[in-house]
């Protein structure tokens, strides 16, 4: 039977003063553990975006009419609030799950040997974006689901996805200077693609803010734009993104680019085609809630794919110094 190390007062004081350093001194995660922690934060971020969309599409946006409590008298949803209260409160609880997942990613990154400050910084950036979006979500409720605040809520979630994907990619790389895999002209084309994608997502929030799904059964004011007009603008931007993606794939083939950028561009093109099909079907079928929800999921997947294309344009080789010491993840070892 393994002897449990003694815990001294100095250990307790260190754990209270700097818990991350305390854990890092006693645990070294494998590379796979760090990668899975980062990937889990990407997945959980998409989950909370999609469930947030479900809150809006089921008319549960004001199921909990105040914030941070669910009601003035109760922290949690009550039986009298029905299904809408349960859905809204459930989505709020997922924020705590997301915080735990991001916290796990931070702990895993901080505990690597040698420590990689860039990974830890990306983890903390996610944490503060989650905190900021939680506060913004509360403001959304307090202002009665004002569509501009709802749009800002989604855009901040998109920023969180970008950081989470970047951290996930960096867990599979070293800390050497990035080496470009393509020429400057291709990089510029990809940045045009990124900019067009950001504009596409932003206009998508305007389409949502001008459309019929207000997020509550009551009459929530909309943005005031002509929904048909902004929907057509959104479609034009989508075709621009598709065209840029196809052009990028053609250019990468022409310059005999490495497999990584080609594969990521192909993935983006296929996701865009599926997202476009859903978009057109929902447009011509009067925006059924299920298809709108799938379109929100597709928006997240498109943005993830765009980020992966951007990050595939360079490589950071893993050196011997970048490899963490192998340790058994199933237990904490003594110092």
Image (cartoon, rainbow, N blue to C red):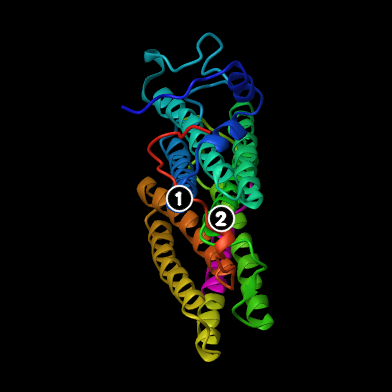
Considering only order in the chain, which callout, 2 or 1, is on the residue closer to the N terminus?
A: 2
Name the residue that disc number 1 marks: 326
**Location of residue 176 by image quarter:** bottom right
The secondary structure making up most of the magenta span is helix
Residue ID at (43%, 23%): 85
Residue farthest to the left, as pictured: 1
Residue 307 in the image: above or below residue 96: below
Name the residue that disc number 2 marks: 204
Total marks placed:
2
Boundaries of the magenta span: 223-242
Residue 84 in the image: above or below residue 202: above
Mark 1 closeness class: few <14, some 14–19, many ≥20 residues within 10 Å: few
- Foreground tag (1 vs 2): 1
Residue 201 x %, y %: 58, 57
Residue 54 x %, y %: 42, 39
Residue 3 vs residue 231, the one in the foreground: 3
Residue ID at (35%, 47%): 290
| CA separation in Å, label 1 and label 2 | 45 Å
Residue 334 x %, y %: 49, 32
Residue 243 vs residue 319, the one in the foreground: 319
Label 1: state its secondary structure: loop
Instruction: State left or right for residue 43 relative to residue 252.
Output: left
**Location of residue 131 by image quarter:** top right
Is residue 238 magenta-colored?
Answer: yes
Quadrant in the picture for the N terminus: top left
- Residue 222 shows which numbered tag? none
Label 2: state its secondary structure: helix
Residue 100 in the image: above or below residue 207: above
**Location of residue 220 by image quarter:** top right
């Amino acid at each position: 039977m393994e002897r449990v190390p003694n815990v001294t007062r100095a250990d307790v004081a260190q754990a209270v003063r700097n818990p991350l350093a305390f854990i890092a001194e006693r645990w070294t995660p494998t590379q796979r553990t760090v990668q899975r922690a980062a990937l889990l934060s990407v997945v959980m971020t998409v989950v909370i975006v999609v469930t947030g969309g479900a809150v809006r599409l089921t008319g549960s946006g004001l199921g909990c009419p105040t914030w941070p409590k669910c009601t003035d008298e109760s922290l949690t949803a009550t039986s009298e609030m029905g299904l809408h209260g349960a859905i809204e409160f459930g989505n709020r609880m997922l924020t705590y799950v997301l915080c735990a997942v991001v916290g796990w990613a931070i702990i895993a990154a901080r505990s690597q040997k040698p420590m990689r400050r860039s990974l830890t910084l990306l983890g903390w950036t996610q944490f503060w974006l989650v905190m900021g979006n939680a506060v913004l979500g509360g403001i959304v409720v307090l202002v009665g689901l004002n569509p501009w605040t709802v749009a800002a809520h989604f855009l901040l979630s998109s920023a969180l996805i970008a950081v989470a994907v970047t951290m996930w990619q960096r867990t599979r790389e070293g800390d050497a200077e990035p080496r470009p895999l393509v020429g400057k002209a291709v990089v510029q084309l990809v940045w045009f693609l990124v900019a067009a994608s950001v504009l596409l997502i932003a206009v998508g929030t305007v389409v949502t803010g001008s459309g019929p799904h207000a997020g509550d059964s009551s009459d929530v004011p909309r943005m005031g734009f002509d929904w048909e007009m902004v929907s057509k603008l959104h479609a034009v931007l989508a075709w621009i993104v598709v065209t840029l993606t196809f052009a990028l794939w053609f250019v990468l083939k022409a310059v005999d680019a490495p497999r990584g950028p080609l594969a990521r561009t192909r993935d983006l093109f296929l996701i865009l085609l599926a997202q476009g099909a859903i978009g057109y079907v929902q447009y011509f079928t009067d925006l059924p809630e299920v298809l709108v929800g799938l379109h929100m999921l597709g928006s997240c997947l498109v943005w993830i794919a765009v980020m992966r294309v951007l990050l595939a344009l360079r490589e950071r080789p893993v050196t011997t110094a970048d490899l963490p010491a192998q340790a058994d993840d199933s237990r904490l070892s003594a110092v």
